[in-house]
Amino acid sequence: MRALTKSAVLAVAATVACTLPMGVAAAQTSPFGSLGSLGSSDPGPETPAPQVTVSKSADISAAGETITVTGSGFSGAGDGIYVGLVQDDKFSVTDAAAWMTTKWLRSTDIVGGSWSAAIDVEAVKAGSDCLVNACSIYTIAAHGSSDRSQDTRTPITFAQPIVPAGPAVTVSKSTGLTNDEEITVTGTGFGRGGQGIYVALAQVDRYSNTDSAVFHSTKWIKAAQIVDGGFTTTLKATAIKGDANCYENACAIFTLADHNTLTDRSQDTQTPVTFAPPVVVPTPTVTANKTTNLVAGDTITVSGTGFQGAAAGTGLYYGIVQDDQFSTTNSAAWITTAFVTPAQIVDGSWTGSISATALKGNSNCYVNACSIRTVMAHGSTDRTQDTRTPITFAPLPPANAVVDAPEIGNAASVHSSSDSGLPIAPLAIGGAIAAGLAVTALRRRV
């Protein structure tokens, strides 16, 4: 119905007044009442409808991204509003489970009808898939309110994930590896369907995708660590495990699906690696110019090779020790000792000499096993420089040995020295007897 203006009313009133008798006209009142009682027909400003904007509405990362949602024109009444992501064909104002993500804005969060919130969104969640279905940011009055005036819908779309051609691996170093060297392994095209993988080093002819015991070293790459199909990790390149040996046999870096999808062979790769020949650390070795039938007082020249030298820092002790008396800390147990300084060890080699000594204290190399020993000096606990070189001494003459003496005739035939006048034969006999007594005494000591 069209509203009448004041001027139109006045015109109608004047026409009516002219057509009526004067008295009647004077006596009648306007059927529209007093003109002064007519109010303005302007309804005033309308209440603005709620509006929503988003910081990003297209090509949002399917793996997840945070967007800023801003609203204006909201009432801020009651319990506030809910804002969140919903697959359009699952939208419900009463079923919270249909929403992929939700944030509650209380009435106090809405100032002058406006608000702003950061919302985490991802393409696939809780049975909803925004990669193949239409999805939107929705707002509704909170707590099951029947007020539909706060409902809004703002469509958003996600970027389709890049599907890699297939799993591939590169390593920072694949040849000339040293044992237990850390290498960097980088992969692309992994993690389809949100699966993790194992990265492992193994001997090729021992490899098994069901027996982890064959792996020399292993890393587990969880699904969350694989971003857009890619990952980077470090792996210790261990050359030997058990009887598996990468120095002598072909080895490789393997990838395979983790225990959650262990039968999936789509994540399998094999990247060959090789090791440099191992550095052979020479074993300390000692030689002596004479080791058997030694006679007390002999000079023994002792030579060593394969020793650490200056790297050891302390030098070496070497000397003769009765085997069952040997000690690395008690020098009194050694029959004889000499010291080799670190500077005297050149390229692992040194030379020294000791006197062949068979007896000292309770040690007796005539009747017990003895050796030339080497140890790190000054009480070192490093046993890598220990060596043992057996030696033997020539046996002593028997205690009852008969000493030959010149045959003596009658006393009258004994001549005396022209110089001293002393008989020669008795002196010779006495000397022989004295020598025999000395040998007997030594044997008793033995």
Image (spheres, grey):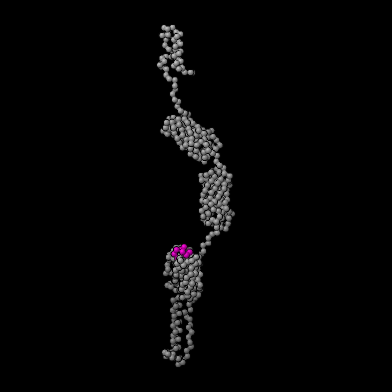
Say if 443 sits above or below 167 in the image.
Answer: below
Looking at the image, residue 190 sits to the left or right of residue 7; the answer is right
Task: Return the residue nearer the eye: 140 or 17.
Answer: 17
Residue 308 in the image, given as x and y percentages of width and height: 48, 64
In reply to whether residue 313 is colored magenta, the answer given is yes
Say if 20 sits above or below 246 in the image.
Answer: above
Residue 132 in the image, given as x and y percentages of width and height: 56, 37
Residue positioned 54% across, 45% down in the render: 229
In reply to whether residue 269 is colored magenta, the answer given is no
The quadrant the C terminus occupies is bottom left
Extent of the magenta region:
308-315
Residue positioned 42% across, 8% down in the render: 25
Task: Return the residue nearer the eye: 421 or 271.
Answer: 271
Residue 253 in the image, given as x and y percentages of width and height: 55, 52
Residue 243 visible: no
Residue positioned 45% across, 92% down in the render: 412
Residue 155 visible: yes
Q: Quadrant of residue 194?
A: top right
What predominant SS class does the magenta segment belong to?
A: loop
Task: Return the residue nearer the eye: 99 or 119.
Answer: 119
Say if 405 sits above or below 109 in the image.
Answer: below
Say if 421 sits above or below 126 in the image.
Answer: below
Residue 69 in the image, given as x and y percentages of width and height: 47, 35
Q: Quadrant of residue 278?
A: bottom right
Find the residue positioned furthest to the bottom. Answer: 412
